[in-house]
Image (cartoon, coloured by chain):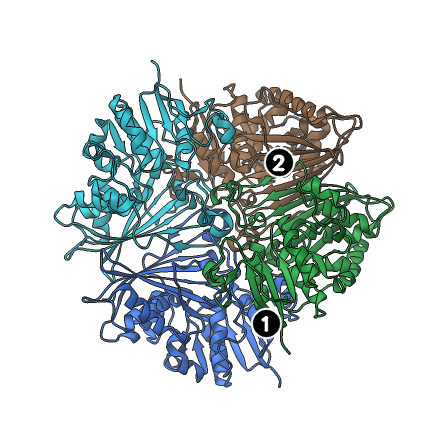
Chain colours: A brown, B green, C cyan, D blue
Amino acid sequence: MDKIKVGIINVTGYAGVELARLLHQHPEVELASVTGRSAAGQSLSEVFPHLAGIDLTIKTKLGDVGLVFSAMPHKESAVEIIPLLEKGIKVVDISADFRLKDGSEYQRWYGFSHPAPQLLAQAVYGLPELHRAKIASAQLVANPGCYPTGAILALAPAVKAKLVVPDIIVDSKSGVSGAGRTLSLTTHYSEANEDVSAYALEGHRHLPEITQELKLLNPELPPAVTFVPHLIPMTRGILTTAYAPLASGKKGIEEIRKLYLDFYKDEPFVRVADSPPHTKQTWGSNLCLVYPTVDQRTGKLVVISAIDNLVKGAAGQAIQNMNLMLGLPEETGLEAPAIYP
Amino acid sequence: MDKIKVGIINVTGYAGVELARLLHQHPEVELASVTGRSAAGQSLSEVFPHLAGIDLTIKTKLGDVGLVFSAMPHKESAVEIIPLLEKGIKVVDISADFRLKDGSEYQRWYGFSHPAPQLLAQAVYGLPELHRAKIASAQLVANPGCYPTGAILALAPAVKAKLVVPDIIVDSKSGVSGAGRTLSLTTHYSEANEDVSAYALEGHRHLPEITQELKLLNPELPPAVTFVPHLIPMTRGILTTAYAPLASGKKGIEEIRKLYLDFYKDEPFVRVADSPPHTKQTWGSNLCLVYPTVDQRTGKLVVISAIDNLVKGAAGQAIQNMNLMLGLPEETGLEAPAIYP
Amino acid sequence: MDKIKVGIINVTGYAGVELARLLHQHPEVELASVTGRSAAGQSLSEVFPHLAGIDLTIKTKLGDVGLVFSAMPHKESAVEIIPLLEKGIKVVDISADFRLKDGSEYQRWYGFSHPAPQLLAQAVYGLPELHRAKIASAQLVANPGCYPTGAILALAPAVKAKLVVPDIIVDSKSGVSGAGRTLSLTTHYSEANEDVSAYALEGHRHLPEITQELKLLNPELPPAVTFVPHLIPMTRGILTTAYAPLASGKKGIEEIRKLYLDFYKDEPFVRVADSPPHTKQTWGSNLCLVYPTVDQRTGKLVVISAIDNLVKGAAGQAIQNMNLMLGLPEETGLEAPAIYP
Amino acid sequence: MDKIKVGIINVTGYAGVELARLLHQHPEVELASVTGRSAAGQSLSEVFPHLAGIDLTIKTKLGDVGLVFSAMPHKESAVEIIPLLEKGIKVVDISADFRLKDGSEYQRWYGFSHPAPQLLAQAVYGLPELHRAKIASAQLVANPGCYPTGAILALAPAVKAKLVVPDIIVDSKSGVSGAGRTLSLTTHYSEANEDVSAYALEGHRHLPEITQELKLLNPELPPAVTFVPHLIPMTRGILTTAYAPLASGKKGIEEIRKLYLDFYKDEPFVRVADSPPHTKQTWGSNLCLVYPTVDQRTGKLVVISAIDNLVKGAAGQAIQNMNLMLGLPEETGLEAPAIYP
C-alpha cells in the first residue's frame, strides 16, 4: 500500500525541522512536501545538513498531500490553514491559532482578531491524554504549546480528582530552543549561556491554554493559575514544577501516586516516575515524565514534569496526533528512547 | 598601620577558594593562613593556578590570625570553631553549624547532635540586611546558606510589612557550583549538562533557615514555606522565584515596589531591579537583585531574586560580615561589578 | 525467524548504555543479557531511566548469546573476552585490548603485558571503511577508539593517495562524555564548564592506533603524527582538524575533493561535506562528516572531521561491525538522522 | 590630583562594555564619556544592568577627554579616529584599522581602501610584551586582535630564538563572545550550544597580524602560518595550540621552558605555566598563560596559550596600553585574579 503523503508548512523553524526528522523515520507516512519562505528554492539538506538523507526542495507552495502540519507563526498559520480545511485536508496546527475555544482571547493574548472564530469549536485541542477520541475524528487539531503540555499533564490527575484546591503555581524552566530559530538578544549565545531568568511576568500566552484545559477537568472549580516561565542555559527540555494546596482531608503520598499511576496507566507517552525526573531523560523522545509528591509540612501537592519541548512539546506530539487522525497505532514512528547522556 | 591578619579553614572547596580570591584583593586585611586536608603541603597556586599571585602554603593547622573563616563541612566546622572562640578569635562560619537557633533542629535536618548548643544564642545570623548591628558586635557570625540569602532577601520586605499571607512557595534554580567541589554523579559534567531537575523534595536543609528568619520578621504569623531547589546547567548563580498570596485589601504594584525600594534604600548590596533580573548580572559580584511584581489575575505577589551563589551566597557575604565585625566600611573589597557577558 | 541474541559486558558506562539504546531499536538482534559490576541486581531502567522500555536486569555473568560487546576497561576486557572466543562466540571489543597489532605497544602505552598476544593477529581493526571484508569474516573485532575514528577517516584518502607528506598534526576537540562515566575532577561540571584545555601532551593512548592504520595505507612512508586532544564543554562530539603538507606538484582543492568523494562514494556512514562540518550535525547518529580543503598560502592540506564520539566513535560503530559480522545490511538499526538543534 | 578623563566610542559591544567595567575600577582614570549609536540617550546602566554603579548616559558624540578607546567596527573606526588624532588626543583603537603596516592588506583582507595609510607607520601595534617602549610614546596604539594576542605570545620566544622552522600551525579555540554582540545564526544559542566547528578556512583576518608580528621577530625567516579558528560552546576564552618543527640540533624541553621563562620573566601579564593551561584560569583577568612542550616522537614544538578574549584579547590589553601611554604602572586597574570556577 502506498504511504500517506504529508507536508509541512514552514519547515525552517525548530518545530518544522524536528517534524521533518521524525517524519522521515515514520514507517507509514511519506514527507512529500515542505515549504519555507526564507529558504525557498534550497534543498532541505542544504539548510539542515543533519537531514542529508531527505531529498526534498523547500518550496513556497505546498504540493498534493493528505495531511498538513503548519509550523507557521500564530496569526499567519490560520491564514494558511483555512483554505486547506475547505479542501478537506487534515491539518495539525503547531501554532496557537486554534487552541483557544474563546475567540476573544486571541485579541487579548495575541493582539489579533481571529479570522475564523467559527472554526474554534470544531478544532480539537491535541493533547491525546485528554482528548484522544475527539482527535481521532478531527479534521483540525490544535497542537498544544510546549509549556501547557508539561503543565497540564502534571496537574490533570489531581485537578480531575479534586485532590487540590485549584490555586495553582506553575513554575517552568525551559531550554532556549523553545524561543525558536529567529534571532534575538535573549537567545544570543553569550547572553543566554551561564544565565537564568524569569520572563513574561505580566502573563505568558500559554496561560489561557493551561487554564482552559484544567477548567474542563473540573468545571465547578475554575482554577487560578500563576504561571512563570524561566529561560535555562540548555537547548532542549522543559521542567515544570507545579504547586497546589491539597484539598482538606486529603490523602497520603502513596494514594496520590496510585491516582497518577491509574490516570496514566494506558498512556504510551506518559510515565509516572519513581524519582524526580530530569529533562535529560526525555531528550529527543516523545515521553513526558511526571512525578507527584507532597510537602507534608505545608499540605501542598508538588508535581514535577519533564518533556523535550521540541518533541512531546511540539513535533512529536503533532505526529502522535497525526497517528490518531490517520487511524495508525499511536506510537508509530515515536518509539525511539531518549538519548543519554 | 598593619593589616589585620585573617585565615581560612578548608580553603580547598569552592567557598574557600572564592574567599581567598576576594580577600587577596581586600585592601584592609591580609590573608595570612589557609588550611586544607586534601592538599596540605602544596602551595595555594599549585592547586588553584588562578591564584598564582598569592604566596601561601596550604597547612593542616591555622597560623596566628585575628579572624577566621571556616569553610569546613557542617558538624566538622563546629569542632574547629569552638576552640577558636575560647581563645577570643572572631569567626565567620560558612557552614550551617551556627545558623539555627533551635539546637534540636540539627538532629532533625543534619543528623547530628550539636556539640555546643549554648553557643547558638550568641551566634548572629549573618545576613547584614536584617542583623547589621548585631553582626558588628558579634564574635561568631553564621554566614547564611546560598538559597536562604536569595529567598529571604526576596521576601523580607513583604513579610515584615504583612503584605502577604505567609503561605509561601520558594522555587529556586541554582548553578552546579552550589553542590561543591566534591565529586558526585549528579555534578558529573555529562550528567548535569543539558539537564534540569528538582531535588531534595522531601525537604532541603536550607528550609529551616528560611522559616526561622521569616518568622522573626513577623512573629505573629509564622510562615508555611514550600521550598524546591533545582539544579541548572551553569556554574554560578541562583535565581529564586517566590510566590505568596497578597493579604486582602492590598496594594498595587507601584506601592509594592516603593515598599521594596524603601526597605533596601540604604543597602549597598541589594538593588531593586527595574526589570526581571538575570543571574548573569550578578556574576562574580556581591550584589543581590530583587524584583517584586504581582500576578493581578490571582492576587499573588511574585518576587524574583538573583545572586552569585559563591559571592553574596557565600564568600562575598562572609567578607561583608567580616567588614562589619572589624568596623570597616561594609563595601570594602567588594566593589567589583559583575562580569558580563 | 528468531532474532540473534546479543549481550553487553559492562553496560553501565557511557559506551555500554549507548549500545543498549541502539540495540533496543535494532530490528534483527535482541539485547538479551547485560552485565555490570557496580549495578548488578538492579534493573537496567532503574539505573538508566531513559531506557525504561527495556526489561533487563543487570547481572554479574552474561547469559547465553551469540555475539558479545565488551565495554570493559582495557586490560580487564581481554580477560573477559578470551574465554568467550574459546567457546566460539563472536566478540566486538569496545576497549583497546585488541586494536594494536604489536603486542609490545600494550606495555608502552597501557602499562600491562598483553595476556594473549597471539590473538592480536586474528583480531580485525573495526573501521569498516578500511577493513570491511575482514570484519565480515572475523570472530573478534577491535572497535576503534573515538579519536582514531575521526582522525583516520579524515586522513585515509589523502595518505592512501600519497597526496601529502605524512608529517601530520591531528588537533582534536572532544566533548566530555569521551572521558566516561567514572568521576574525576576534570569532568566535574564546574571545572569542565566554560573551559577548554589540551591534555595528554606527553602522548595519548590513541596515537599508536592512528599511526598503525595510516601506515597500513602507505607502508613506504610511515607517518609522523603529532596528536593533541582537547576537552570541550559539551557532552557529545569530536571535531578533528588534521594538517599535512601537500606532496610537491600536488593538486587543487577540486581535485582533492574529488579524491575524497571517490574514496567514500559507497560509504553509508561517511559523507564528504560541502561546508565545514559541525559536531551538532552528527549528534546521536553514526555519521562521520569529512571536509577536506587546502591552505593555498602554505601548501597544507587541512581536513576537518566530525563524529558523535559515543556513536560512530563507539557504540554505533560497534553495531556497524556487528552487522557486518552477522551478514546483516550494514546500516541496520543505525539509520536515525542526527538530532538538531 | 584630578583623574585623567577617558572615553569609549561604541560602548555597546562586548569589548566596549568590558572596557567600561574595567575602567570603572581603575584608580587613576575617570570614564567620562561613552558613545553608542543603537542605545544613544539611554543610561549605561539601563542597557547593561551589571554596570548600575556607573552614572553615564550613552551619547552620540564624545565629550572632552584626554584619551579615547575606539570599539567601532573596522573601517568605521578609522573615520572616527582620524579627527581625534588631529586634535592631539591619544587613541587606543580596538578595531583592526591600524594594526597592519602594509596598507594594501586592508583591501585584501577587509575589502576597503584604507583612508589614511600614512598613519599606519605611526601607529604602534599594541602588544606590550613586544613593543612596550614604542607604546609608551605613541599617540595611536592599535590594540591586537584576540587570536593574534594568544598566538603571538605562544610563539614569540621560539621564533625570536630561531628555535623552530617557521612552518607553523595555529589551531585556536574561541568562546562565542569573540563573535560579538551582533546577532547571527552562528551565535544563536541553540546553534552554538553543544557544538564545535572550524570556520574561516579560506583565511581569517587575524592571520596577517600574526605573520606580520612573527616576521618582525625573525626577519630572515618569514613564517608560513596556517591558522584555523574554531568556535567553542562557552562565552569567554581562547585556547591556542601552536605547532612548529624544531630547528635541527635543537633543544630539550627543559631548555625550551627556560627560554620561555627568560623571555617572559618581567612580564606582569604572561605566565609560563607548569601544566597545560585552562582558559578558565584566565576568566575575567588580563593574564596570558603559556605552556611550551615538545612532541619528542616528531620533533615538534607544541605551545598552548590561554587568554580571556575580552580582557587580554581586547579590553584589558587596551587598558594595559593606556597605562603605558599615560605613564602609569602597567598593572594599574588590572590586578584582579581570574574568577574560578
Dot in front, 1 or 2: 1
Q: Nearer the viewer, residue B132 or D38?
A: B132
Task: Give the amino acid at mark 2.
Answer: Asp
Image mark for residue C156: none
Name which residue lies at 84% across and 48% down. B219
The residue indicated by pointer 1 is D25
Is D186 located above or below residue D34 in the figure?
above
Q: Nearer the viewer, residue B120 or A174?
A: B120
Q: Residue furthest top?
A: C1
Whole-angstrom CA distance, mark 1 to mark 2, is 52 Å
The residue indicated by pointer 2 is A97
Label tally: 2
Is D252 located above or below residue A280 in the figure?
below
Q: Residue furthest left?
A: C220
Looking at the figure, which quarter contains the C terminus of chain B?
bottom right
Name which residue lies at 46% across and 27% down. C40
Task: Give the amino acid at mark 1.
Answer: Gln
Instruction: State the image coordinates of residue B104 (x, y, percent, origin top left).
Output: 74, 42
